[in-house]
Image: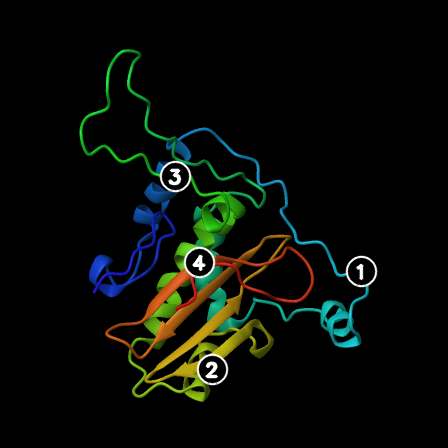
Amino acid sequence: MTRTHGSTGTFARSSRRPRLTLALTALAVLALGACGTAKATGGGEPAAPATPTAATAAAAAKPMGSLSSPALAGLQKEIAQICPAPGTPMEQPPSPRPAPPGEEAPAGTVVPAMPTTGPMVDLDTRDWCAGVQHESYVYLGIEKIAEPTPAKVRAALTALGYPDDRIHDLKQSGATTHFSLDLRENGGRLCLQGAVGGEEPVTDKCVAPATGPFAATGTQY
């Protein structure tokens, strides 16, 4: 079963090859740039609480573990080669043109609503491009977990090179285990959410605050 969510780029085996090649990803990035008018990200960070608790303050002060690791070296090299510089704004597809004056739109025409929040709006092009690579990499690392539990999924993610303090929201619901990954680097807001244990794993980009404690905004699987 293929899982898709608009233009968020959900990774599922039935709709992609097991490994995204450099050429295909580069074309995807170019296609994003050709879609429409650039929209500046503008930050969009949630305001910090006026009186944070001691636990929240401690979490905010704790430095995140680096994403650089021998296991992730190949993936990070690909991202550095094919993805644009951090801060490059995402370009969004324009809304369909309205019917000319005096004419009616064809019957059944649906004008999709432009997103106002989520990965397409809040991630820059660098994060989006990097997210595509992480989706594929994580998918391949979790797809063969038998009877996945939070402990098994954590072990698989750490084996892929993700530090333990970047793994969040591990929870089991029936036969399915859900998780989030904090992939923020260089002021970016990228994170990834996924689930394993259903018909096939699902991995998808999400958005986290640029600074402070991790919290994912996106599709909850």
Closer to the camera, 132 or 114? Answer: 114
Q: Which amino acid type is shown beneath numbered disc 1?
A: Ala
Does 152 sit above or below residue 12? below
Q: Which amino acid type is shown beneath numbered disc 2?
A: Arg
> Which disc is residue 205 wearing?
4
The reply to whether callout 3 and callout 1 are in contact (CB within 8 Å) is no
> Which disc is residue 37 wearing?
none
* Residue of label 3: 113
Residue 134: image quadrant is bottom left
Residue 17 location, x and y as percent? Answer: 23, 59
- Foreground disc of the pair 1, 4: 1
> Which disc is residue 154 wearing?
2
Residue drawn at the location 31% of the way across and 88% of the way down: 147
Q: Earlier in the sequence, mark 4 or mark 3?
A: 3
Q: CA distance from mark 2 to mark 3?
A: 37 Å
Q: Residues within 10 Å of mark 4 (few under 14, many from 20)?
A: many
Residue 216: image quadrant is bottom right
* Residue of label 1: 50
Q: Is residue 100 left or right of residue 73?
A: left
